[in-house]
Image: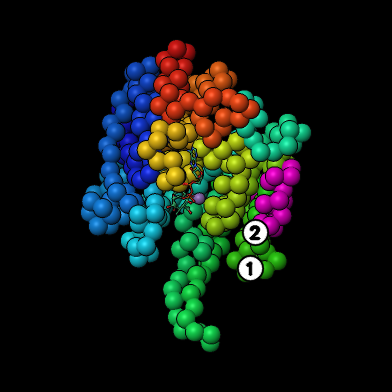
Amino acid sequence: MDFNVTLLPGDGVGPEVIDAAVAVLGAIERKYGHNFHLHSKNIGGIAIDTTGVPLPEDTLSDCKAADAVLLGAVGGPKWDSLKPHLRPERGLLTLRAELGLFANIRPAVLHDELAQSSPLRADIAKQGVNIMMVRELTGGIYFGDRGYRDGAMGQEAYDTEVYSINEIERIAKIAFELAMTRGKKVTSVDKANVLATSRLWRATVERIAVGYPEVKLESMLVDNCAMQLVKNPSQFDVILTSNMFGDILSDEAAAVTGSIGMLPSSSLGAGGAGLYEPIHGSAPDIAGKDEVNPIAAILAAAMMLSQSLKLTNEAWAVENAVHKTLAKGLRTKDIAVGGKKAVSCSRMTEEIVFAILDM
Ligand code: NAD
Ligand code: IPM
Ligand code: MN
C-alpha cells in the first residue's frame, strides 16, 4: 500500500534518530511491499535558522495532509535565549495544538533483556514495569495565560493552569478504553489536595469511571506517584494525568525502564494525522557523535505503523526486531552496563534492519 508520511527531524540528535527510523521503514517497505512516501520538513531550531519561525506554514500544511507525522526532537542551547514565541519548543506545541492532538500515549516497558540497565533494585525490577502513560497534551499550564506584570514585590511572572470538563472527559475516556485492553486499572494522577484544576480532574475522572465498571480506578497525588514509580512500579497499568505532570512522570518512567532513549510516544486526536516521536529531547550533549540510542524513535515508527497506518504485522516485526537485537546483546552507550561494550547508533540500526529482513 501507499502512505504519505511527513518527517520532522528537527534539531540535535533528531536527524540521527529519524535516519534510523527511515532505515527501518525502508526494511518494512522491502519486506512487505509498501511504499512510504516520506517528505522531510523543518521544525524547531533548524526552521528558525532557515525561515525565521519554528513552525513554517509549509511544514504545518504538509503535516495536515499526511497520513502520519514522525518527529525527532527540537531545541538546543543555540536557541535558548530567543523570545518564547520564537523558541523551537513553541513549534512543537503549536503543531500539537493545530493537529488537535490531545492524547499523548507513552508506553514505558522494562524489557526483560534490559533488567540490568534499569536503575531499579533487582527485586523491584523483577516484578516488571509495563505502564501506559496517558498524558493530556493540548491543555493545562502549557496553554494557559502567561506573562509578566508588576506585582506588590516588583516584577513577577505567571503561568495559568486551565482545564475544562470536556478536555478531562475526552482524555479520561482514552485511558479507560486503553485499560480495557490491558490490566483494567487506571491510576489518575493529580494534585487535588492543592489545585482546583486537579479537583475538577478527579471528580470528572470518577464520573467517567462509572461507565467502565470493569476498570479499577485509583486516584493518586503526583508527589506520591513520583515516589511509587521507583518504589513499586509494577502496581501501575494505565496512568492518566495532565500535560505537565505527564511530561515529568514520563521521563521518570523512561529512566526506570533503562533509558529515556527507549521510550516512544504517539499523539492522537479526533482524526487526521497522528504524531509519533521519541519522548526524549535533542540531547545536545551527544548530538553528532553517532552514540544516541535510536530505539525510542524506531519504536515510535512502530507505533505509527500500527496506530495510523493500521499495519499491525509490520509494527510487530519492528518490535520483534528490537527485542532480538537487544537479546543478541547489542547496547548503545545509555543502556550498556556491566562492562558491555557500547555500539554506535548506526550499528544498532543496522542490526535492527537486519533482524527485520531476516525474519
Ligand atoms: P534530553 O531528553 O534531550 O536529554 C536528557 C539526557 O538524556 C541527556 O543527557 C541526553 O544525552 C540523554 N538522552 C536523551 N535521549 C537520548 C537517547 N536517545 N540516547 C541516549 N541518551 C539520550 O533533555 P534535555 O537535555 O532536558 O533537553 C535538551 C533540549 O531538548 C531542550 O532544548 C529541550 O527543550 C528539548 N526537548 C525536546 C523534546 C522534543 O522535541 N519532544 C523533548 C524534550 C526536550
Ligand atoms: C516532551 C517535551 C516537550 C513537552 C517540550 C519540548 C515542549 O518535553 O515532548 O516531553 O514538554 O511536551
Ligand atoms: Mn518531556
Extreme-right residue of the structure:
123
Residue 256 percent across, percent down from the top left: 63, 40
Is label 1 in a helix, a strand or a loop? Answer: loop
Residue 211 percent across, percent down from the top left: 65, 49
Residue 138 percent across, percent down from the top left: 46, 56
Residue 298 percent across, percent down from the top left: 45, 31
Residue 244 placement, left or right of 49 = right
Quarter of the figure with residue 41: top left
Quarter of the figure with residue 258: top right
Q: Which segment did they paint magenta? A: 210-232
In the rendered view, would you say 196 is above or below 173? below
Residue 235 placement, left or right of 246 = right
Gap in angstroms between the C-alphas marked 1 and 2: 8 Å
In the rendered view, would you say 209 is above or below 328? below
Q: Earlier in the sequence, mark 1 or mark 2?
A: 2
In the rendered view, would you say 91 is above or below 108? below
The residue lying at 38 percent from left, 44 percent from top is 12
Q: Are marks 1 and 2 in contact (CB under 8 Å)?
A: yes
The residue lying at 43 percent from left, 29 percent from top is 345
The residue lying at 29 percent from left, 49 percent from top is 46
The numbered disc on residue 195 is: 1
Is label 2 in a helix, a strand or a loop? Answer: strand
Q: Nearer the viewer, residue 309 or 352?
A: 352
Instruction: Name the residue that disc number 2 marks.
Output: 190
Report crowding for label 2: few under 14, some 14 to 19, many 20 or more residues within 10 A (C-alpha). Answer: many
Amino acid under disc 2: Asp
- Can residue 84 be seen from the camera position used here? yes
- Can residue 69 be seen from the camera position used here? no
Amino acid under disc 1: Leu
Q: Is residue 59 magenta?
A: no
